Image: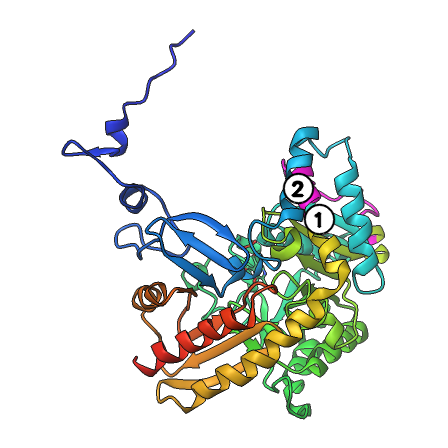
Amino acid sequence: MRDIVVVNPDHFSTFTNGYILSNIEFDRQHIWHPYTSAIDPLPCYEVTGAKGATIELKNGKTLIDGMSSWWAAIHGYNHPVLNQAAKQQVDAFSHVMFGGLTHEPAVSLCRTLLTIAPEGLNRVFLADSGSVSVEVALKMALQYWACQGRKEKHKVLTPRNGYHGDTFAAMSVCDPINGMHSLFSGVLNKQVFAPAPQTRFDQTFSEDDILPLQELFERHHHELAALIIEPVVQGAGGMRIYHPEYLKRCRQLCDAYDVLLICDEIATGFGRTGKLFGCDHAQISPDIMCLGKALTGGYMTLAATLCTEDVAQGVCQGDPGVFMHGPTFMGNPLACAVANASLSIIGQGAWRNQVAAIETQLKAELTVCRSLSAVQDVRVLGAIGVVETRSAVDVGRIQKQCVEKGIWIRPFGKLVYIMPPYIITQEQLSTLTSGIYDILANL
Ligand SMILES: Cc1ncc(COP(=O)(O)O)c(C=O)c1O
């Protein structure tokens, strides 16, 4: 038997010249952060706590959170109900494999999801992240057609400016230019891209908006397995808010041309846009729907792919007769228990007034940014506020200014945006919006 190797901390730069590296310096030298260079990383700020709509830094600063940790922490941090659910589940069991076993937290979660989801969705596949739930959705669509003897239906139609995750199939349906993945274009599956929807949420819908999509359906329907779209708000591909009629037409075109509709509600789900799901603005039901992010109130990673009975039956007819996917942490009980607690808070309904109040305040307080020379556009829907600048901003510089002002946002490209926890107070939100105004006024 081999001896256990005792790791020499020096190998990991815990010490440099006899000094212990601070966490921040160790992090900078060894840990990769999202979309960040290993050679010249953006600065990071060390967190020691988070509560409600605030994040506490090690340097003693308290920041008002404008990001909900990327759309997820809708009820705020350190929520007593979510904490209690996690603690209770830890004491029962944290994880068991989902192959051949099931448990109350998963069953209860899937019951609730199917009760609140758009009509017709009847089966749930629990996945471990948003990107994986998109992989699962695409795989379901391809397997569905393959099992009907229609293997030629293997492409996916999607509007430009979309974002669906960072894994390979998900990357193939992200905007090919904006989508952060252009480097991989040579190896990604070739999908069919439509122009992005142009009619804004509150404009009169223009018929011209749907014509290019209709033409693509006519030309490609024989090879299309599915259309994938983020309902009403295109998130990381441009933070664009479009007219629900476009989504309604997507449903109609999918029906007319025998193509499955996949709605990616990972960012828009659970009230963020002012309705429980983005689909609800258009009163449509997809064939397949992806959920994630706020599913656990931002406590831990969990996602779900829901589908209709028709899709489920279609996928499992013929060879191989099963759906070929099964992550190790599928249906993790701890994550399901917290998701159940989060959904119980959603079920109480306070989010409706909270999101409506945030929308009113964002409209009032962010619109003034339009007068700034650096600003191109301002758009708001539900608890989402976007300020688009004329040229790309310096993220590191803006974040430093934000931290000095006691607020937390994370812009990308030309997009300075906020989507705060629903429980944010009016005063906290004003601190965020006035901070953004001041920073953009001095760009
Ligand atoms: C619409 C949408 N789909 C998919 C994803 C990927 O989710 P995850 O980061 O959990 O893999 C995201 C993440 O931002 C998203 O906004």
Residue 341 numbered mark, or none: 1
> If you read the primary sequence from the N terminus, does the residue marked by circle 2 or circle 1 appear first?
2
Which numbered disc, 2 or 1, marks the residue closer to the eye?
2
Question: Is residue 104 visible in this depiction of the protein?
Answer: yes
Residue farthest front in this picture: 427
Secondary structure, mark 1, is helix
Question: Where is residue 439, by image quadrant?
Answer: bottom left
- Which quarter of the rendering shows the C terminus? bottom left
For residue 111, above or below residue 285: above
- Which quarter of the rendering shows the N terminus? top left
For residue 399, above or below residue 104: below
Secondary structure, mark 2, is helix
Relative horizontal placement of residue 64, taking residue 345 as reference (left or right): left
Residue 18 numbered mark, or none: none
Look at 63% across and 35% down and name the residue there.
Answer: 328
Three-letter code for the amino acid on which mark 2 is drawn: Gln
For residue 351, above or below residue 439: above
Q: Under 8 Å from ligand 1: the CB of mark 2?
A: no
Q: Ligand 1 shows up in which quadrant of the image? A: bottom right
Span colored in magenta: 314-338
Look at 65% across and 78% down and name the residue there.
Answer: 216
Q: Residues within 10 Å of mark 1 (few under 14, many from 20)?
A: many
Residue 84 numbered mark, or none: 2
Magenta-colored segment: predominant secondary structure: loop
Nearest the viewer among 270 and 177 is: 270
Question: Where is residue 42, by image quadrant?
Answer: bottom left
